[in-house]
Image (cartoon, rainbow, N blue to C red):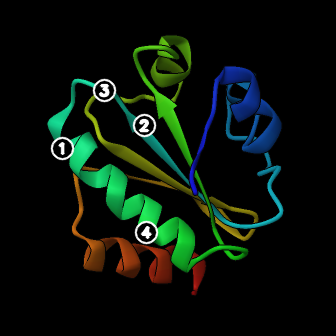
Amino acid sequence: MSENLNAKDFQDKIFDYTAGEVQPFKGSRPAIVDFWAEWCRPCRMLGPLLEELAEEYAGRVDIYKVNVDEEQDLAMAMGIQSIPSLLFVSASAPPVMLTGALPKEGLVQAIAQNFGL
């Protein structure tokens, strides 16, 4: 199951976005951060797919959600200009941001490309 993050949670579990440059990833497993909003129809379509992936990749990939309406400063700092936006982050590679509601096959492919899973 995915977990909702506020700005402090993001700093504790992902990296300190206030430092001005990308900081080291703090997680123990690769993570996907979904930047979304309740009013966003593509975001609502993507949500169930991410929940499926959270179950399928349990223990291997953490999936988080950030509501851009509630965490505007975080969204701005991360350069979110359209939603949904997915941040793929791990300790072994630079963060990658993908935008748009990808189909499940596209999400699985992005996980394979970014995390080698």
Q: Are marks 3 and 1 in contact (CB under 8 Å)?
A: no
3 or 4: tag closer to the N-terminus: 3
Q: Which residue is mark 2?
A: 35
Residue 52 is tagged as: 4
1 or 4: tag closer to the N-terminus: 1
Q: Nearer the viewer, residue 20 or 12?
A: 12
What amino acid does circle 4 point to? Glu
At x 69% / y 33%, what residue is drawn?
10
Label 1: few (<14), some (14–19) or many (≥20) C-alpha neighbours in 10 Å: some
At x 42% / y 50%, what residue is drawn?
86
At x 53% / y 12%, what residue is drawn?
73
User: Image quadrant for the N terminus?
Assistant: bottom right
Q: Nearer the viewer, mark 2 or mark 3?
A: 3
Relative vertical location of residue 77 with respect to residue 101 in this rendering, above or below:
above
Determine whether, in the image, residue 62 is placed left or right of residue 53.
right
Real-space CA distance between mark 4 and mark 2, rounded to the nearest whole angstrom: 17 Å
Q: Are marks 2 and 3 in contact (CB under 8 Å)?
A: no
Determine whether, in the image, residue 109 is placed left or right of residue 31.
left
Q: Nearer the viewer, residue 54 or 26?
A: 54
Real-space CA distance between mark 3 and mark 1, rounded to the nearest whole angstrom: 10 Å
Real-space CA distance between mark 3 and mark 4, rounded to the nearest whole angstrom: 19 Å
- What SS does tag 1 mark? helix
At x 54% / y 66%, what residue is drawn?
54
Real-space CA distance between mark 1 and mark 4, rounded to the nearest whole angstrom: 16 Å
Relative vertical location of residue 56 with respect to residue 81 in this rendering, above or below:
below
Q: Nearer the viewer, mark 2 or mark 1?
A: 1
What amino acid does circle 2 point to? Phe
Q: Which residue is mark 3?
A: 38
